[in-house]
Image (tube, rainbow, N blue to C red):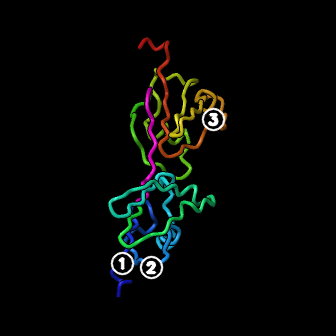
């Protein structure tokens, strides 16, 4: 009878989020399997496990790559929350802001989501700032004017695509 009372809560970017029956020995991968996996827009690297009044980061990307230290044992009333991913487009674009991350979003789709660039944009100096501190230069001039698709870089959750204004724009 304890089986029906004991539950696990799978919230956020699961294919089928909800309340699952808990059973002894249940682990994170069991919940992922029972919910049909993660949605394409899941930010798997920044999941959260709440156990009682304690919360801890859960990196499901590491788990999917074989790091079983992330496949923690679960207890009744535990909550796994997987956020949806977002990216930002800022600077010399028509509609700067935050946008939902979908599968295979690349620089061109991100630019389109932000309404395109303004006349003041410095297309040769765009950069993607990644959550891990990495900066990825993006030559929008080469992509848009020369068709160099190597510059159509895929975006990750938390990325900021920044297009600076040209110093020649008089701004």
Is 104 a magenta residue? Answer: no
Q: Is residue 32 above or below residue 163?
A: below
Q: Disc 3 marks which residue?
A: 151
Query: Which mark's residue is nearer the viewer, 3 or 2?
Result: 2
User: Mark 2 falls on what kind of element?
Assistant: loop
Give the position of the C terminus as an image quadrant.
top left
Front in this rendered view, residue 14 or 118: 14
Q: Residues within 10 Å of mark 1 (few under 14, many from 20)?
A: some
* x and y percentages locating residue 30 in the rendered image: 51, 72
The stretch of residues the image draws in magenta is: 81-92
User: Mark 3 falls on what kind of element?
Assistant: helix
Give how far apart the Cα atoms at labels 3 and 1 are. Answer: 50 Å
Task: Give residue 23's mark.
Answer: 2
Query: Which mark's residue is nearer the viewer, 3 or 1?
Result: 1
Q: Give the prevailing secondary structure in the magenta stretch.
A: strand
Front in this rendered view, residue 49 or 146: 49
**In the rendered image, which quarter is residue 51 located in?**
bottom left
Give how far apart the Cα atoms at labels 3 and 2 are. Answer: 48 Å
Q: Residue at x 43, y 36 (%)?
A: 115
Mark 1 vs 2: CB contact within 8 A: yes
Q: Disc 1 marks which residue?
A: 6
Q: Residue at x 67, y 34 (%)?
A: 148
Q: Earlier in the sequence, mark 1 or mark 2?
A: 1
Q: Residue at x 50, y 34 (%)?
A: 161
């Amino acid at each position: 009878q304890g089986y029906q009372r004991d539950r696990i809560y799978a919230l956020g970017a699961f294919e089928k989020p909800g309340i699952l029956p808990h059973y002894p020995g249940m682990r994170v991968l069991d919940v992922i399997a029972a919910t049909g996996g993660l949605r394409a827009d899941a930010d798997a690297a920044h999941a959260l496990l709440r156990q009682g009044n304690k919360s801890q980061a859960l990196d499901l990307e590491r788990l999917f790559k074989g790091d079983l230290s992330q496949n923690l044992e679960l207890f009744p009333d535990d909550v796994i929350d997987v956020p949806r991913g977002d990216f930002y487009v800022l600077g010399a674009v028509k509609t700067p802001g935050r946008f939902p991350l979908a599968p295979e979003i690349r620089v061109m789709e991100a630019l389109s989501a932000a309404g395109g660039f303004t006349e003041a944009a410095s297309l040769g100096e765009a950069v993607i700032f990644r959550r891990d501190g990495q900066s990825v230069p993006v030559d929008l001039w080469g992509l848009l004017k020369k068709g160099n698709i190597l510059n159509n870089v895929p975006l990750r959750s938390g990325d900021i695509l920044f297009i600076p204004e040209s110093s020649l724009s008089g701004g």
